[in-house]
């Protein structure tokens, strides 16, 4: 009888493994791929009052948020946001890096041991196998197995790295068939709701549409001229100007890369996120869940057109409406006092360097191909052998086997090559493995490079360029159009960070906040142990009630 009463007592009490009511029922992490902090203000007059502006005025706005390492790329950015540490710990040092074992470049989420689910293409062979530390989403699932973590993005890395190793579902866009897919790392088949969503064929239908400006194009005074010599051309289009008739540009084919550079892809991702909230029953019990959304289109379009283009302004005007729609659904389904949302970016972007040059501002290009051929010749002449295996992401990878066979001290080779690199006028600073190990080069730039360095994936020598410079293979007309990111400078490292929802105050925070502080803050919002390698510090202004 006592045993029966005890069992009844256990059944009647709340699940001891569930979190208390202090935590939000749902955390929503929004990462916008390539967003400069200033976009919040430059485009503010054209935003609605229910999207970015609502977050800025009714939430906590951390206005001096920085990346504290280089390189500022998509893979490292997403990994750092969700692990709360830098590439020196989580190991995602770039989007792609040179793999010494295979002698090839590998993508940060490539995994040949898995198969695609929902696709037969190579685009499904991905997982977080290269991520060396736990994410906040891992920690939530590790502590509370009943918690749900769902992550999504157009880009594979934008979905996989936030979701971590224990995700209940991470989904990315398969360019070969225009659908959301996953891999066998997570599931053996797509959930029914994902299949049903794919069956709507939204991307294919969008290829019959035309992208035009949301407002009359004459009102886009926050940008430069629509027909700009600094912008890349799309497909067979003669000028980089509105409108963009996708049916004409795709020539009737399913060219899904055209779909992803348009704002239609942001709508598609928002639709998918809302479907996941309802079908996965996120935030519907006492256990906190986590939804990770990464909007890739601003980066895809931003590379092509640059930060002062009409195209990018229209992307953000329309993205604001998607953010507003998502917030409205969250408040309707979960309740404002039941969720916490944060919005940030994985990096920002440099203005088109040719634009800087033409306007007498610091900037330009490092044309690597001729420079590297000259450097290889100098190394051969000095050491009697080619010691350079590869050069990518401003990393130089050395041939350790050849150096060992010739009894060449790696430190001596590093020092010589670093000395030659410092002679390049486009190079600001050069660092070697020995510098990092001995801490012999203690500067702000050195610290940022060191925090982005992981010995197995990084080269023995890393250099950074002068402000406003981008690396290009060689000098062509096309190389002077479009732009990129990856540097230590503010145009790449200064990003938005806004918090909104349960127990989040209306306030501006102007002190410096590092991007790795997001996870450190979430550990306290969710009352979790810090993920294993987290080095960030909690943002006290958010936690102090």
Image (cartoon, rainbow, N blue to C red):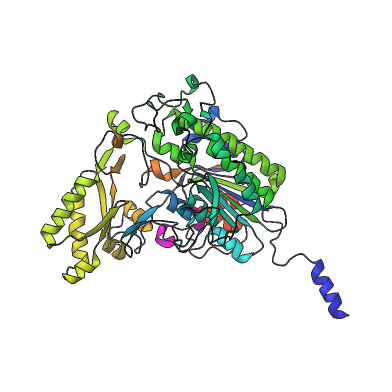
Viewer-nearest residue: 507 or 23: 23
Left or right of residue 486, residue 165 in this image: right
Tally of numbered discs? 0
Where does the image place residue 153, in percent across and percent down from the top left? 53, 47
Where does the image place residue 186, in percent across and percent down from the top left? 56, 60
Give the answer, above or below, for where 18 lies relative to 421: below
Taking the view exactly as shown, the residue that stands out farthest to the front is 252
Q: Residue at x 54, y 63 (%)?
A: 530
Viewer-nearest residue: 398 or 464: 398
Q: Which image quarter holds the N terminus?
A: bottom right
Give the answer, above or below, for where 493 lies relative to 449: above
Viewer-nearest residue: 209 or 136: 209
Where does the image place residue 515, in percent across and percent down from the top left? 47, 51
Q: Residue at x 45, y 28 (%)?
A: 310
Where does the image place residue 391, in percent across and percent down from the top left? 27, 54
**For residue 165: magenta?**
no
Region in magenta: 81-94
Q: Residue at x 35, y 46 (%)?
A: 487
Residue 176 visible from this viewpoint = yes
**For residue 88: magenta?**
yes
Left or right of residue 496, residue 419 in this image: left
Left or right of residue 371, residue 232 in this image: right
Taking the view exactly as shown, the residue that stands out farthest to the top is 218
Give the answer, above or below, for where 383 lies relative to 278: below
Choose top left, top right, bottom left or bottom right for residue 215. top right
Residue 501 visible from this viewpoint = no
């Amino acid at each position: 009888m006592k045993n029966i009463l005890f069992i009844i007592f256990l059944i009647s009490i709340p699940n001891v493994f569930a979190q208390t009511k202090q935590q939000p029922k749902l955390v929503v992490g929004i990462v916008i791929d390539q967003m400069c902090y200033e976009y919040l203000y430059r485009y503010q007059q054209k935003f609605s009052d229910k999207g970015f502006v609502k977050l800025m005025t009714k939430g906590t706005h951390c206005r001096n948020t920085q990346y504290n390492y280089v390189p500022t790329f998509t893979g490292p950015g997403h990994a750092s946001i969700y692990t709360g540490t830098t590439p020196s710990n989580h190991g995602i040092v770039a989007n792609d890096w040179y793999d010494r074992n295979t002698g090839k470049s590998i993508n940060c989420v490539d995994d040949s041991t898995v198969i695609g689910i929902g696709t037969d293409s190579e685009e499904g062979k991905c997982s977080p196998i290269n991520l060396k530390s736990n994410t906040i989403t891992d920690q939530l699932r590790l502590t509370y197995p009943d918690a749900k973590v769902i992550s999504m993005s157009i880009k594979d890395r934008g979905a996989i790295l936030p979701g971590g190793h224990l995700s209940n579902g991470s989904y990315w866009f398969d360019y070969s068939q225009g659908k959301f897919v996953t891999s066998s790392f997570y599931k053996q088949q797509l959930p029914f709701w994902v299949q049903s969503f794919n069956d709507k064929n939204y991307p294919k239908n969008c290829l019959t549409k035309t992208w035009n400006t949301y407002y009359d194009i004459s009102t886009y005074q926050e940008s430069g001229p629509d027909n700009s010599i600094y912008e890349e051309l799309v497909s067979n289009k003669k000028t980089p100007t509105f409108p963009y008739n996708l049916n004409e540009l795709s020539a009737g084919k399913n060219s899904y890369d055209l779909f992803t550079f348009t704002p239609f892809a942001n709508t598609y991702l928002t639709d998918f996120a809302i479907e996941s909230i309802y079908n996965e029953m996120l935030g519907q019990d006492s256990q906190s869940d986590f939804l990770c959304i990464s909007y890739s289109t601003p980066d895809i379009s931003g590379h092509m057109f640059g930060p002062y283009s009409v195209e990018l302004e229209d992307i953000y005007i329309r993205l604001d409406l998607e953010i507003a729609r998502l917030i409205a659904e969250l408040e309707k389904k979960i309740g404002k006092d039941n969720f916490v949302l944060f919005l940030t970016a994985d990096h920002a972007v440099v203005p088109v360097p040719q634009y800087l040059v033409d306007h007498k501002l610091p900037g330009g290009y490092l044309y690597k191909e001729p420079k590297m051929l000259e450097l290889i010749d100098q190394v051969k002449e000095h050491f009697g052998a080619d010691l350079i295996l590869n050069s990518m992401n401003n990393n130089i990878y050395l041939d350790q086997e050849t150096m060992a066979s010739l009894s060449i001290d790696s430190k001596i080779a590093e020092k010589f090559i670093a000395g030659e690199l410092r002679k390049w006028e486009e190079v600001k600073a050069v660092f070697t493995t020995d510098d990092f190990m001995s801490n012999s080069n203690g500067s702000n730039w050195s610290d940022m490079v060191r925090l982005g360095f992981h010995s197995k994936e990084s080269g023995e020598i890393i250099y950074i360029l002068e402000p406003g410079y981008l690396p290009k293979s060689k000098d062509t007309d096309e190389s002077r159009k479009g732009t990129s990111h990856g540097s230590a400078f503010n145009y790449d490292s200064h990003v938005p960070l806004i918090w909104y929802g349960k127990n989040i105050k209306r306030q501006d925070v102007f002190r410096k906040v590092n991007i790795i502080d997001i996870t450190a803050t979430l550990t306290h919002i969710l009352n979790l142990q810090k993920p294993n390698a987290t080095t960030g510090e909690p943002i006290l202004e958010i936690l102090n009630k």
